[in-house]
Image (cartoon, rainbow, N blue to C red):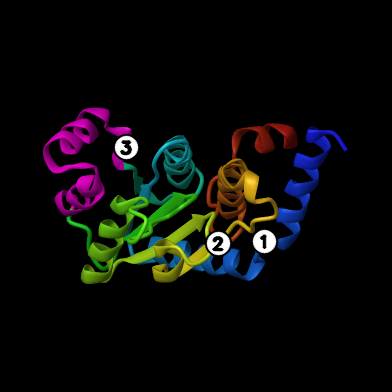
């Protein structure tokens, strides 16, 4: 079997193993968030930063959700990193944004927070603040048992089928699951361009 065949086989295995009920639970959280007029704050690091920017676009444009990502403002991100330290970047940004009980965090991550291994401490402090103020936490993550997975109100865990490919598969399925949410008829309120053009 070539590597390409192996990778695609693993991809199909992951898709088959994804928890559809947990996907529906995440969508219900997002629908409830919109109904109560809350804001969605999308958090990611590394490759996931581009995914959260994509999420902000789609949640705002397609789902009609007020949505933001702290990593979209590079000036503030780097200033806070320099002044407050990387572990506090998200939590201080969320405090400035007055995160409250109407709001929710949406976390896209592979490792998604681990105290003992000092993995993604920025997510941990952000989730702790969310819990303090009563905000909801939603995630798409690549590690079962990580901080986000154990603390979230709804979280899709990308199954591991090959320990050597956790990162590429997790990050690829961020986009797959995100688009499942966005295209869900309970959440989608605005037609996307190419689908509407196809019908005309």
What x and y, as percent, mark residue 40? 36, 54
Q: Residues within 10 Å of mark 1 (few under 14, many from 20)?
A: some
Which residue carries the number 2 mark? 156
- Quadrant location of the N terminus in the rendered image: top right
Q: Main secondary structure of the magenta part?
A: helix
Is 78 within the magenta? Answer: yes
Q: Is residue 7 left or right of residue 97?
A: right
Kindly identify which residue carries mark 1: 18
Q: Nearer the viewer, residue 59 or 146?
A: 146
Q: Which mark is residue 71?
A: 3
Q: Are marks 2 and 1 in contact (CB under 8 Å)?
A: yes
Residue 102, above or below 105: below
Q: Dot 3 surroundings within 10 Å: few (below 14), some, or many (20 or more)? A: many
Residue nearest the viewer, comparing 141 with 181: 141
Q: Earlier in the sequence, mark 2 or mark 1?
A: 1
Calculate the distance from the C-alpha at mark 1 to the C-alpha at mark 3: 28 Å
Displayed quadrant of residue 75: top left
Q: Is residue 91 left or right of residue 111?
A: left
Hey, which residue is sitting farthest left in the picture?
83
Residue 46 position within the rendered picture, expressed as x and y whole percent measured from the top left: 42, 37
Helix, strand or loop under label 1: loop
Question: Residue, x 80% and y 46% (percent of image)?
Answer: 9
Label disc, if present, on residue 183 of the rendered structure: none
Query: Which portion, as a residue range, is magenta?
Result: 70-97
């Amino acid at each position: 079997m070539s590597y390409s065949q192996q990778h695609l086989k693993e991809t199909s295995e992951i898709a088959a193993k994804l928890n559809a009920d947990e996907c529906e639970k995440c969508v219900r959280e997002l629908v409830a968030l919109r109904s109560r007029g809350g804001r969605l704050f999308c958090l990611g690091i590394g490759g996931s930063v581009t995914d959260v920017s994509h999420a902000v676009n789609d949640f705002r444009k397609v789902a009609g959700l007020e949505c933001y990502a702290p990593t979209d403002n590079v000036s503030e991100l780097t200033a806070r990193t320099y002044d407050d330290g990387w572990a506090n970047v998200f939590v201080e940004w969320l405090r400035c944004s007055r995160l409250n009980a109407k709001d929710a965090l949406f976390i896209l991550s592979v490792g998604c927070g681990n105290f003992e291994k000092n993995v993604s401490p920025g997510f941990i402090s952000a989730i702790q603040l969310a819990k303090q103020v009563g905000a909801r936490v939603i995630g798409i993550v690549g590690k079962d048992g990580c901080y986000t997975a154990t603390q979230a109100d709804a979280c899709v865990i990308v199954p591991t089928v090959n320990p050597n490919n956790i990162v590429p598969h997790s990050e690829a399925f961020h986009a797959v699951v995100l688009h499942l949410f966005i295209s869900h008829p309970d959440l989608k309120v605005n037609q996307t361009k190419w689908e509407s053009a196809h019908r005309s």
